[in-house]
Amino acid sequence: MTAARVQWRQVGVIAEKEFRDRIRNRWVLAVAVLFTAFALAIAYLGAAQQGSVGFRGIDVTIAGLVSLVIYLVPLIALLLGYDAIVGERDKGSLELLLTMPITRLELVIGKFSGLAAALAFSTLAGFGLAGVLLSYQIGLAALLHYAVFMVSALLLGLSFLSLAMLVSVLAGNRMRASGVAIGLWFFFVLVYDLLLLGFLVVTEGKYDLGFFPLLLMLNPADIFRILNVFWLEDVRQLYGLATVFPAVLANVWILGAAMALWIAAPLAFAIWRFR
């Protein structure tokens, strides 16, 4: 596999078609509106249980949004990409596509690029509109903090979209692909942290947990959580991350590189298997 063999014009055509299809069915636009509504609701109503309403600061808003994003964005990304390849195979259109002057490599990259553009549009437009509406109440530093949150949310989505592409290549049909995609969501979002917590409780601290931060890095949802809450003092204590995750690893570049690996590795494996 060499970059010289990739005709990027062909990749662009496939990506544009995939993006237009997702925009045309308005599913992406609905997700963007949903993100804006949730962001504003959490910003102004997040403290309603404590008997007060109103905007309490960008840090509190981001802390509330982190939990929302961890549940919603991976699910949306998996549903967006699980049938990208296997769906074409089930419809019988994959063979027709491959008779055209495009390679399998260009097809996978084009599909992923188009879906990534759709996911980026819904994530950045949705949370970005909320940021614009909140901007008159916050300063430049808070806006930059919010921008980091939006970019990290997009990286989280791309990592699960990459996993979805891998599932779509490996699965025998759409039904199996959808089942595996939902299973991945349950594992990474709901089960993985419970397993780690159970291990801590069962072992009662008898074993050296020096490897525990690396276990957290094996889950893109945990990387996203650490990236957004570790450097907020009040939130860090609330999550208890300071006791299990060393500050030296909580570097934005290290965590960003780990997230980039989560995007590149499944996609590279999907390309290798599809060829």
Image (cartoon, rainbow, N blue to C red):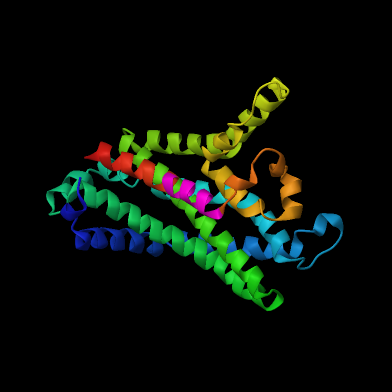
Query: Which residue is painted at 58% across and 60% down in the image?
Result: 149
| Picture coordinates of residue 265, whole percent (x, y) | 37, 42
Residue 86 visible: no
Image height check: is 78 above or below 146?
above
Please tell me which residue lies in front, 170 or 176: 170
Q: Main secondary structure of the magenta part?
A: helix
In this picture, residue 147 sits left or right of residue 56: left
Q: How many marks?
A: 0
Q: Does the magenta run of residues contain 212?
A: no
In the current view of this chain or complex, which residue is farthest to the right? 51
Q: Quadrant of the C terminus?
A: top left
Query: Which residue is painted at 69% across and 73% down in the image?
Result: 138
The residue range painted magenta reads: 252-261
Q: Does the magenta run of residues contain 254?
A: yes
In this picture, residue 133 sits left or right of residue 99: right
Please tell me which residue lies in front, 6 or 51: 6
Query: Which residue is painted at 60% across and 46% down in the image?
Result: 248
| Picture coordinates of residue 116, whole percent (x, y) | 39, 56
Q: Quadrant of the N terminus?
A: top left
Residue 268 visible: yes
Please tell me which residue lies in front, 274 or 202: 202
Image height check: is 17 above or below 92?
below
In this picture, residue 99 sits left or right of residue 148: left
| Picture coordinates of residue 249, whole percent (x, y) | 58, 45
Query: Which residue is painted at 60% across and 68% down in the image?
Result: 144
In the current view of this chain or complex, which residue is farthest to the bottom? 136
Please tell me which residue lies in front, 178 or 189: 189
